[in-house]
Image (tube, helix red, strand yellow):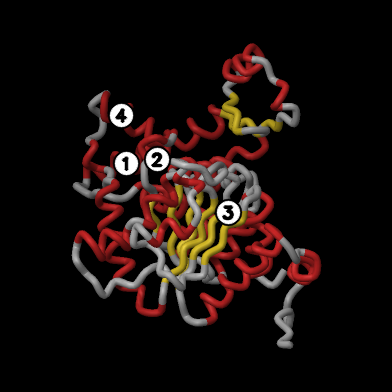
Amino acid sequence: MKNTMKGKGEISKFIEKYFLHFNAATLVDAAKGYESQLANGGKMLVSLAGAMSTAELGKIFAEMIRQDKVHIISCTGANLEEDIMNLVAHSHYERVPNYRDLTPQQEWELLEKGLNRVTDTCIPEEEAFRRLQKHIFKIWKNAEEAGERYFPHEFMYKLLLSGLLEQYYEIDIKDSWMYAAARANLPMVVPGWEDSTMGNIFASYVMKGELQASTMKSGIEYMTFLADWYTDNSETGIGFFQIGGGIAGDFPICVVPMLYQDLERTDTPFWNYFCQISDSTTSYGSYSGAVPNEKITWGKLDIDTPKFVIESDATIVAPLIFGYLLDM
């Protein structure tokens, strides 16, 4: 039997030795499938939903980016900005271990302190949201005055690479996946960016007449960008690694049926690997909890596409899979 653990580290050896059945076994199979995808010259899209940036996934995801194990990202606007918020305001975050016991009154008191809770972690409004706001507004305004338009993530890349935030750094910069992505100029799509904090702030400037909505490139432009990127990179196959559900996954996976059915490019290949980490229970009408086979009927996955669903907590599972891929 071939030794698959050559060169692997202790985390990889541990999960291969003990993760043998059920969700644990699927985790190992999915990790090996991801590894095979890269070894065969294929590319990988990673989608980030939930609050993975606040969960500090950047500590390991940034290294995945640096080692060229991620080729395009789809993420929510929240994950886009919250990685940078953690970079500049980490010491001001407050953890609430007993969050399940909070009363409405206690939640209100957190609001009055400027602390916005994400499960057991509170993001400080003044040090995080407002600290970014004053710098990103100038970048938005400068682009508009120059007659330039960019995607949301491109504006964030400009902010990170400008050096304006270095005075605020509170974690090691190597633990910021957004900084790693900016350095690599990694392709990205951020569907539904408007519902993020920075999206809300941008909308407020539009309503006040200080910015034009057209300065920010739209979701339709993200889809057409993704269509071109997929077409240009699909020769060796593109995989889909989905963390959570929602728009971060639903938006990009639809590019294949759009190309095949709506543009009638019938030579468009399907996604050739699929894995979703989700604790959404499969049920009628629960799209995020739909099994991968359902995606065959929508023209997203092929009959033979390797398909994995790991029904567990992504904050536990994703670092283990990434650790395996990084030979940790």
Circle 1/circle 4 CB separation < 8 Å: yes
SS class, disc 2: helix
Assess whether mark 1 and mark 2 are in contact (beta carbons under 8 angstroms). Answer: yes
Vertical placement of residue 163 versus 140, above or below: below
User: Farthest residue toward the front?
Assistant: 284
Q: Is residue 168 visible?
A: no
Eye-nearest disc, 3 or 1: 3
Label 4 Cα crowd, 10 Å radius (few <14 / some 14-19 / many 20+)? some
Q: Nearer the viewer, residue 50 or 171?
A: 50
Please report whichever mark, 3 or 4, sits nearer to the chain's N-terminal start.
4
Quarter of the image that includes the C terminus = bottom right
Marks 1/4: CA–CA distance:
10 Å
The residue at the point 57 percent across, 27 percent down is 116
- Mark 2 or mark 4: name the one nearer the start of the chain: 2
Q: Of the numbered discs in the image, which one, if any, rests on residue 140?
A: 1
Label 1's element? helix
221 and 22: which is toward the camera: 22
Nearest to N terminus: mark 2 or mark 3: 2
Of residues 224 and 301, the one nearer the viewer is: 301
| Front position among marks 3 and 4 | 3
Left or right of 273, for residue 61: right
Q: Which residue is mark 3?
A: 277
Amino acid type of disc 4? Answer: Tyr
- Residue type at mark 2 is Ile
Provide the residue designation for mark 4.
Answer: 205
Residue 41 rendering spot, x and y as whole percentages:
47, 80
Give the residue at x 31% y 31%. 203
Question: What amino acid type is highlighted by mark number 3?
Answer: Ile
Residue sitting at x 46%, y 76%:
42
- Per the image, the residue denoted by label 2 is 136
